Every structure is written in C-alpha cells, then in structure tokens.
Amino acid sequence: MIEYDTVVRNARVIDGTGAPWFDGDVAVSDGRIAAVGDVPGSAGTELDADGAVVAPGFIDIHTHSDFTLPANRDAHSKVRQGVTLEIVGNCGTSAAPRYGEGAEDVDEGFAYRGVGDVVDTSAWESMGDYLDHLEGADAGGVSLNVGSLIGHENARIPVLGYEDREPTADELEEMKAIVDEALSDGAVGLSTGLIYTPGAFADTEELVELASVVADHDKLYATHMRSEGDDIFEALEEAIEIGDRAGVPVQVSHHKAVGRDNWGKVKYTLDRMQRARDRDGVEIQCEQYPYTASSTSLGARLPTWAREGGTDAILDRLTDEETRAEIREELEANTDSWGDILITNVRTPDLENVQGQTVAELAERDGESRPPAEIVIDLLIEDRVRTRHIHFCMRDSDVEEVMAHELTMIGSDGNSLRPTGPLGDGVPHPRSYGTFPRVLGHYVRERGVVSLETAVYKMTGQPAARLGLEDRGVLKEGLWADLTVFDPETVGQGGSFVDPAVYPDGIHHVLVNGEFVVRSGDHTGARPGVAIR
C-alpha cells in the first residue's frame, strides 16, 4: 500500500495549464507532487476537499515585498490569499544589492514602509546575501517562496547618484557589472521604474545596454514604463525597442491606461504588444492588478525635474517660493480631480489625521486658506516625501479588457502585510490582501470576464512559464507541491478601500513545498519557503 505525506481528495482539480477541471485527488510526498487523479493508498494527512478547487499555488509576479518580508516572514496577507511565490524587486527598486549611495536608498525604502527600525539591513549587501537572509533558518525563514528582480536604481545610484545625466562609458560598465553580479547571484531579471527618479533620467540607450546583460543570462526585463497616461503609446514603443535591440523578454508592469483622456487606449496597446510578438518577434507580455485605482508615493506626482538629487534636493525646491509656484502649476495641470487622490500612509505621527482622506476633503476642511496643490506640497514637506496615496484613475471596462487578453497575467503590485504592528499602519491598497480572490470572485464568478481555468492559468502556469520555472506552476507529478485549495462559490476579497486590511474569504488551505502554511483558513506558522534563483 502506497503511503503519502498528504492527499487532498474529492477535489475539483485545475492543473494550471488552462485545461478544463476534473474530479480527482492530489498526493504529496517529500515536498513534491506524488500523484494527480484517482489516487489509491493512504496518507499521514487525508484532506477532504469536498468539491473545492485544488490548484497550483498562486504566483504573484509583481510585488514589492522585498521591503516587508524581513519584517513579516509569515507573509500573512499573501499566503492567506493563496500566494506561494512572490517575485519582488519591481518598478526599478529592490532590497538588494546595497552598494555605496544605493545602500542609503534601500534603507530609505524600508523606512518608507514603516519598518526601518525593525529590519537590520546590514545583514546583506549583494543579491545573494539578501536571498540567503530571507530563506535562512537562522534569520527565521519565510512562509512562501521568493524570487527577486534587481532594480535598475540599485545599479544606477551607486554609480551616478541622483544626477540627471547619461553615464560615461566606464560608468555604464560599472552599472552592467552590478546587474551581471545580481543575475549571477540568482536574480530573475532586471526591473525599471521609469516614472520614478533617478530611473526616469535613464535614456533608451542605457536601458538597452543593461537589458543586454539580462539577455546574456536568458532572464526577464520588467518595466514600469515612462508613461501609463498621455504618452502611453510612446512609452510602449520604447519597451518594445528595448526588447528588440537587446533580445530580451519584456514584461510590461501593471498594464493600464491612467486618466480619463486615456481610457480606451488599452485596446491599442494590447494589439500593439500582440503585433510586436507576431510580426517583430519581441517576447512581450504584461500583468495587471484587478482594481481601478493605483497606489504609490505621493512624491511621484511631482514633475520629474523637481525630483532630481534625492530627498533633500526635493525639499529645497518645495520650500523655494519661485520653484514651488512652478511645481504647483504643474500639479494643477496634471490632476484631473483632487477627489480621486486618497492619502493612505504617512510616516510623521502628527500627520496621521490625514490618512484615509482625499486631497479634496482636506481642502474642504481647510476652506479657502489652502488650495489642493498647496496641501500636497505642504504634506510632502512635513512628511519628508514619504507620503503614499491611492489614485482612482482607471475605468472598469479597461481593467476587464486587459484581464481577458491572452498576454496578461495577474500581479498584485502590493506587499506582504498584516493588520497588526508597523505593517498595519495607514490605509493600504486592498490589493495586498485581496488581488487573487478578487479576480476569482468578482471577475470570474460575478462578471464572467474569464473562465475559472483561465484565471488560474494567469496566476500559475503562465507566470511560471514566463519566469522559466519548470518545477512549479502546474499540478504534475514530480513538481514542487505548492498548492491552494479554495471554494469557487465563496472566494472573494475580504476588504475594501475604506477597510483594506481584511483577509479574503474562501481560501481554505495553502501548501508551500508540501507543507501547510494555511490550514482551514488559519496561518500555521510554518516557514518552508525558499529563494528561487
């Protein structure tokens, strides 16, 4: 009689390939999938799914949890929504490497998220050091698997600082060497954040050169493009050009069209990506989060020229009367509605009363004494440019069109959080708690945008193939046993924009490398995750 470690029985099996579901069992032994189908024998743990779905663990291909996992190794908000692998280091910034002036930038990233005083960043310098620190039992381990991109800024800042200029030939070689080392250490690719500084200062030539290093390693170039609004077409052409000239796969991060004047443009950007693949041979895809609101630093709303030189230089401009007037004018010209901008997180305790309010509400509270743009500037000064905001800037039909496209997979663009402690402060975007259940509940069950099997594929097999992972992402004998068991009739986001820190409904069990990290809806405390190199 065959004896397994665990068997999930009486399940609706969705294998992650996009194929139709079937009734069956999934057996696990020694951390791997031992059998799929009608599984005879017994197991140390027999789990009756009672018709619930068993699927591969969800792969969150776009996150920023490299700045929260060292303070939240149980990865509460992610494993509780079925995520078993996070890809961190997106949008041009990663927790490693920490070289030169770039180390200060990394440390500021932890402070920006409220955990600067609880994470000892001196524990690592290189990408290899960081991955070792995450999975190392001596540091506490981690509940899910983690892969990391190297952020473009982690290579640029140690060489050029925050200067708005092209690198010299020697400086470019230094940057390429940093990228090469991180990729050799196991980074899964390179990310850029071209609306953020100093990433915005890089020209196309610089990015092609760095992406060519990625191509040499047969890895991925992920880009937060220069524009997701008025200049989205030009930004996409640049991403395609980089992929073509460097010979590298391109991942367009959190694809969307921002601002009312740009709604509907995703029809053309999706078509352009498809033509780039079919006609030009550029291996381009994208991912999205299932919401009509974005979330990032409030400082990112400042003009690019106003963000050169780092925090102190920004503050000098904001406090200079003449420059402040120029900034205010551009803020007003580039903002559709101040009621669409919600202040979510501050790092200065005296400012906590503004969290959860829109800029329009703050302006109404202050009467005519301070226009909205002045409130934004003053807030950035008082909070030393650490304020975060949510921007309601997309429309539902665009979100649905992007989701339905075959080139799109799912990524939260969020963090591993928990409702208590420093990571529970403020009003975070609900995507950190509810991305995957929201897709399964709202967009599959309620809206019918994609089928259940297609949605699971976009969360599992598709991102696994994108990352070149041959041992995860589908239910197949011999692969690592990352599993999520959920009820398709009840699964859904638990929270909202008003009350986001709520765990989702309908996620019953989650296994990482064959070990339960969520059992009957509760975290087990297990930390079996590894670094994906």
Image (cartoon, rainbow, N blue to C red):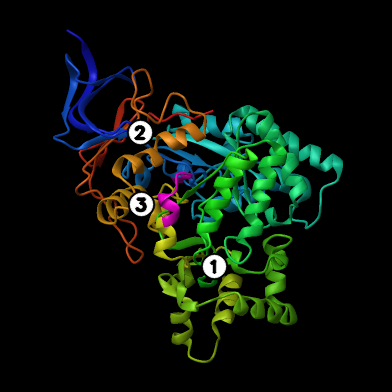
Query: Residue 15 placed where, x, y %?
Result: 32, 30
In the visual, does 349 lie left or right of 189? left
Q: Is the N terminus in the top left, top right, bottom left or bottom right quadrant? A: top left
> Residue 122 lies in magenta, yes or no?
no
- The image quadrant that residue 250 belongs to is top right
Mark seen at residue 16: 2
Q: Which residue is mark 1?
A: 262
- Decide if residue 97 is in sight here: no
Residue plotted at (27% across, 55% down): 494
Query: Residue 349 placed where, x, y %?
Result: 47, 67
Q: Is the C terminus in the top left, top right, bottom left or bottom right quadrant? A: top right
Nearest to the eye among marks 1 and 3: give it: 1
**Magenta residues, as a range?**
401-410
- The image quadrant that residue 427 belongs to is bottom left
Q: Which residue is mark 3?
A: 433
- Decide if residue 453 is in sight here: yes
Amino acid type at circle 2 is Gly
Query: Residue 121 placed where, x, y %?
Result: 57, 42
Q: Count numbered badges in the picture.
A: 3
- For disc 1, the neighbor class at 10 Å (few under 14, some 14 to 19, many from 20) is some
Q: CA distance from mark 1 to mark 3?
A: 28 Å
Q: CA distance from mark 2 to mark 3?
A: 22 Å
In the visual, does 228 lie left or right of 21? right
Residue plotted at (64% across, 51% down): 105
- The image quadrant that residue 111 belongs to is bottom right
